[in-house]
Image: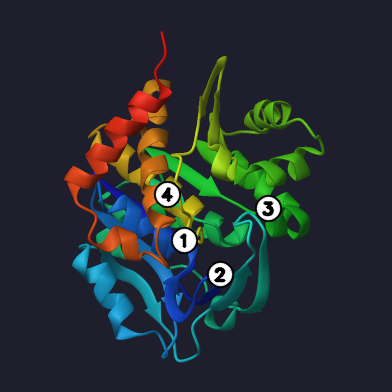
Amino acid sequence: MSVLISGSIAIDHVKTQRASQENLLGGSASYAAIAASFFSPVGIVAVVGHDFPDEHLEVFKARGINLDGIEFSGGETFRWSGEYMEDMNDRETLSVALNVLESWQPSVADSQKTATTVNLLANSHPLNQHAVIDQLGAGPGFTIADTMDLWIQISRHELESLLKRIDLLVLNDSEARLMMDTPNVVSAGHRLREMGPKYVIIKKGEHGAMLFGENEFFACPAFPLHDVFDPTGAGDSFIGGFAGYLASLGKKGYNFADLKSGIARGTILASFTCESFSTHSLHDLTPAAFEERLKTFRQYCEFA
């Protein structure tokens, strides 16, 4: 049982109030794939340029990720530069260069089609997300799509049609409000579900996430960190870990309890992501360290 993750691979330059670093591994598919690989085999569909560092490819290979769906283009890799303020919730994008991503058309490799049980459409243009679904056909048992405010604003029609083809939509609270034109996140979650997906997850950053189902609701806090080093990619790690956990269950259909457990595990992987630049904290994360934090999280959340 494996996860197919399509989306962006990037080279990032990140600056915080304490440090900065260039040529970091970034992109929605990168974070999600590395997080998912903690639980399940993973395939990745993306594009990189001639300037993509070999050391970043080695990160994927070390996690056993199937790279047959990566296109190696002659142009330059998608690049993003951003700076975080003292309040890590406040981030400024300094520059974006789409480069090879601008005209990319995803192509799922044959080796990835038959193995996929969870299809994670990480944040990318809705037309690319549609294209991946078209290529997989009826193969995956569960399809998840992430989105962002840009697509809500410029590709609303394509996004709305996508909602009818997926099992779960994930987006953050401001995006949910924007899409449903309401200040009430709970109302937005229920109304988004009515547009097609069986489930909706609304991410709330340091305040956790909410899961909406038919007559079912679950709220999960974020893991409380004493120090946040770099939150870039935390949301992608969250949904990647969530998808990888579902695939690890070894079944094609998932109930609400399965999704709740997946959210908890995605939350833990997101917390580790925040403790370093890029995906560095995930590279050497051991099952023992993960389970210890998950155990602590359970203690934090239980009550009589």
Numbered disc in front, either 3 or 4: 4
The reply to whether residue 7 is in sight is no
Q: Secondary structure at mark 3?
A: helix
Between discs 3 and 1, the one toward the N terminus: 3
| Residue 108, placed above or below residue 122 | below
Q: Which residue does the numbered mark 4 point to in the structure image?
A: 270
Q: Which mark is residue 229?
A: 1
Q: Is residue 257 above or below residue 277?
A: above
> Gap in Å between the C-alphas at discs 2 and 4?
18 Å
Residue at 41% in and 30% down: 259
* Amino acid at the residue labelled 4: Ala
Q: Amino acid at mark 3?
A: Glu
Rounded to the nearest angstrom, the CA distance separating label 3 from label 1 is: 36 Å
> Where is residue 183, by image quadrant?
top right
Q: Quadrant of residue 161?
A: top right
| 40 versus 16 height, above or below | above
Which residue is denoted by mark 3 in the rendering?
158
Residue 251 percent across, percent down from the top left: 26, 31
Do the numbered discs 2 and 1 sit on residues whose CB atoms are within 8 Å? yes
Question: 31 or 77, which lies in front?
Answer: 31
Do labels 1 and 4 touch, CB within 8 Å?
no
- Nearest to N terminus: mark 2 or mark 3: 2
Residue type (three-letter) at the residue carrying disc 2: Thr
Q: Residue lying furthest top in this view?
A: 304
In this view, the mark in front (3 or 1): 1
Task: Calculate the distance from the C-alpha at mark 1 to the C-alpha at mark 4.
Answer: 12 Å
Three-letter amino acid code of the residue under disc 1 = Phe
The number of numbered discs placed on residues in the rendered structure image is 4
Determine which of the numbered discs, if any, sits on residue 251 in the image: none
Q: Residues within 10 Å of mark 1 (few under 14, many from 20)?
A: some
